[in-house]
C-alpha cells in the first residue's frame, strides 16, 4: 500500500486578485495545500473549519488589516505560524506585527519562487521554538500534585513570579521544568505578554545567535529577510531557555552582556535595541560539573540563578503517582471517546513500584498507551513497563534470625579488634591480652575480617603462641 504524505496547509489572505492567484499557484506547485481569502473577514470561516500549518496575510487589507486579524487569530490559535506581508521599508509595521505575535514577516516585492522554502522554514522554526506540539496539551494542564515538597515549590514560585529576577530550574528530564516556567509567567505581571520557549539543544549552534538577537537581510547565507529575535519579541514578556546547558560558551558571553546591559544588536546590523525580557532557564545537567569543565561559564550561571528551583523526580513523590494516573486516564479517555475506564490493582502496584526514569512525561505517555490498548480495564500488560526487582535488597530483607545474629557478632568482633590494635599501636600480642584471646586466634580473626594492622613486628614468636 502506498504511503500517504500529509501536505502542509497554508491560508493565503491577499486582496489583490492577481497576486493572490500567483501565490496560490506557486505554493500548490511547491507541494502545499492552499486555501485563500480576499479579506480578513472572509478568512474567519476558513479558520474555524480547516487545520492550518501557517497563515500568509497581507498587512493592508480592506476592512480589518493584517495585524488586527493576527490579534484575533492569537486568541484562538496562540501557536499557529503567521507571516505578514508588508510594503518594502515598513519596519515599524513589521516590529509591531512581531510584538503582536507574528511568527515572521516578508517585505514586498519578493520573489514568489522563494516563498515555499521560507514558509517551510517558518513552520519548522515554530515547531523548534514551541517544542513538541503533540505534548503541549498534556503540559498545558499544568501541575497536579498532592506532594508537600512540590506544593512548597509552587507556593515559592507564586511569590517569585511577582518580581523580574532571573530563575534557573533544575531537574531531571520530564519533571515539568517548562510547566513551572509557564506557571511563573502566568502568575506574573507579564502574563498577557509573550512567553517564548527556546530549546537551546534543538537549534543548530550557528543559528542560535540569530535566534536570540535577530538578524538583518543578507547577514548570512539564507538570510533573505530581516528577523526579530526572541529577546526583542519578548521584551515585555518572558523568554524560557530550555536545555540552557547546551548553549555554547561563546553565546553565553554575548547573552550575558545583553542581559546585563538590556541592549542587543541584530546580526549584521548596527542599531542598538533596548530589551527587557524576564529570563527563566532550565537544565537537566549537573551545573557544578558543567562549570568545572568549562561548558557553562560561572558568571553566566550566577546571572541566571538569581533564584533556583530544583524539581524532585517522580520517584521521590510517589504520593502523586496514583492521583496523576487517575487524572490522566480521565483526560485520555475523553480524548479517545472512551467511557468508564478503570485500572486493575495489580497494574496500580506496578505503577507504584516503577522507578519512572522519564518522570511525569513518561507516566503520561504510559497512561495514554494503556487507555488506547485496553477495552475497559487497564491491566499490567497494557502499561508496557517492566519493574526491575532489587534482588540484593530482597535477599537482605529475608535473612533468618541466626544469620542476623551472626552478622552482628562479626561486626562487633571486628570493631573490638580494631580498637585494641589502635590502643596498642598495632601490637598484636598486647591486643590479644586485652581481648582475652590467644595470639593465634587474634591472627585468624584479623585475617578473616581483613583488618589492616600495619607492618609492626611483635617481639613474640608467632609459632610460640598457642
Image: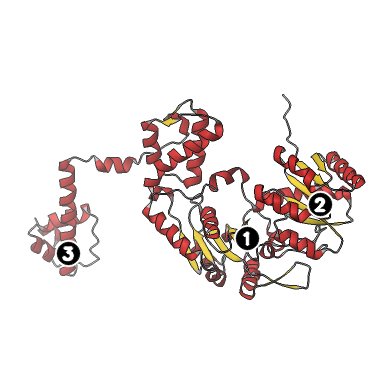
Contact check, label 3 and label 2, Cβ < 8 Å = no
Where, by quadrant of the figure, is residue 236 drawn? bottom right
Q: Nearer the viewer, residue 81 or 4?
A: 81
The answer to whether marks 1 and 2 mark residues whose Cβ atoms lie closer than 8 Å is: no
Q: Position of residue 185 (x, y in %)?
A: 55, 59
Q: Nearer the viewer, residue 168 or 238?
A: 238
Residue at 78% over, 56% down: 105
Specify which label sits upstream in the sequence, 1 or 2: 2
Q: Is residue 11 something one can see in this rendering?
A: no
Q: Nearer the viewer, mark 1 or mark 3?
A: 1
Name the mark nearer the viewer: 1 or 2.
Answer: 2
In terms of depth relative to the viewer, which is nearer, 244 or 178? 178
Question: Which image quadrant: the N terminus?
Answer: top right
Q: Is residue 392 left or right of residue 8?
A: left
Name the foreground residue: 349 vs 229. Answer: 229
- Local crowd size for mark 3, using a 10 Å CA cut-off: few (<14), some (14–19), many (≥20): some
The residue sitting at 51% across, 33% down in the picture is 333
Can you name the residue that lies furthest to the bottom here? 261
Q: Which residue is mark 2?
A: 63
Specify the quadrant of the image occupied by residue 390. Answer: top left
Task: Residue under label 1, please give it.
Answer: 193
- Mark 1 or mark 3: whose residue is earlier in sequence: 1
Rendering coords of residue 312 (x, y %): 43, 54
Amino acid at each position: 500500500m502506498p504511503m500517504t504524505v500529509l501536505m502542509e496547509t497554508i491560508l493565503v489572505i491577499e486582496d489583490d486578485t492577481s497576486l493572490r492567484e500567483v501565490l496560490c499557484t506557486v505554493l500548490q506547485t511547491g507541494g502545499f495545500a492552499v486555501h485563500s481569502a480576499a479579506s480578513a473577514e472572509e478568512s474567519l470561516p476558513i479558520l474555524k473549519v480547516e487545520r492550518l500549518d501557517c497563515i500568509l496575510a497581507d498587512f493592508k487589507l480592506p476592512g480589518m488589516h493584517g495585524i488586527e486579524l493576527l490579534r484575533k487569530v492569537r486568541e484562538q490559535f496562540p501557536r499557529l505560524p503567521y507571516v505578514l506581508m508588508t510594503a518594502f521599508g515598513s519596519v515599524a509595521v513589521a516590529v509591531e506585527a512581531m510584538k503582536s505575535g507574528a511568527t515572521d514577516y516578508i517585505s514586498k516585492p519578493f520573489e514568489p519562487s522563494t516563498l515555499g522554502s521560507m514558509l517551510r522554514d517558518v513552520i519548522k522554526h515554530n515547531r523548534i521554538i514551541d517544542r513538541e506540539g503533540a505534548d503541549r496539551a498534556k503540559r498545558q494542564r499544568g501541575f497536579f500534585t498532592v506532594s508537600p515538597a512540590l506544593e512548597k515549590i509552587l507556593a515559592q514560585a507564586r511569590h517569585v513570579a511577582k518580581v523580574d529576577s532571573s530563575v534557573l530550574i533544575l531537574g531531571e528530564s520530564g519533571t515539568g521544568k517548562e510547566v513551572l516556567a509557564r506557571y511563573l509567567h502566568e502568575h506574573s505581571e507579564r502574563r498577557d505578554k509573550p512567553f517564548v520557549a527556546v530549546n537551546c539543544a534543538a537549534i543548530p549552534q550557528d543559528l542560535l545567535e540569530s535566534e536570540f538577537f535577530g538578524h538583518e537581510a543578507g547577514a548570512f547565507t539564507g538570510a533573505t529577510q530581516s528577523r526579530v529575535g526572541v529577546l526583542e519579541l519578548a521584551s515585555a514578556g518572558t523568554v524560557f531557555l530550555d536545555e540552557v546547558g547546551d548553549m555554547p560558551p561563546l553565546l553565553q558571553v554575548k547573552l550575558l552582556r545583553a542581559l546585563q546591559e538590556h541592549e542587543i544588536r541584530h546580526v549584521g546590523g548596527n542599531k542598538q535595541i533596548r530589551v527587557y525580557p524576564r529570563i527563566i532557564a532550565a537544565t537537566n545537567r549537573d551545573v557544578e560539573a558543567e562549570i568545572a569543565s568549562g561548558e557553562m561559564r560561572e558568571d553566566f550561571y550566577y546571572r541566571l540563578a538569581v533564584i533556583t528551583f530544583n524539581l524532585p523526580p517522580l520517584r521521590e513523590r510517589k504520593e502523586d503517582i496514583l492521583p496523576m494516573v487517575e487524572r490522566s486516564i480521565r483526560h485520555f479517555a475523553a480524548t479517545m471517546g472512551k467511557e468508564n475506564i478503570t485500572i486493575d490493582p495489580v497494574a496500580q502496584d506496578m505503577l507504584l513500584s516503577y522507578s519512572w526514569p522519564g518522570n511525569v512525561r513518561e507516566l503520561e505517555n504510559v497512561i495514554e498507551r494503556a487507555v488506547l490498548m485496553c477495552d475497559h480495564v487497564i491491566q499490567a500488560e497494557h502499561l508496557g513497563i517492566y519493574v526491575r526487582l532489587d534482588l540484593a535488597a530482597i535477599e537482605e530483607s529475608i535473612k533468618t534470625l541466626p544469620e542476623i545474629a551472626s552478622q552482628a557478632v562479626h561486626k562487633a568482633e571486628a570493631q573490638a579488634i580494631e580498637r585494641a590494635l589502635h590502643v596498642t599501636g598495632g601490637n598484636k600480642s598486647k591486643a590479644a591480652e586485652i581481648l582475652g584471646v590467644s595470639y593465634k586466634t587474634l591472627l585468624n580473626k584479623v585475617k578473616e575480617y581483613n583488618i589492616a594492622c600495619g607492618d609492626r613486628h611483635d617481639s613474640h614468636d608467632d609459632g610460640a603462641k598457642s
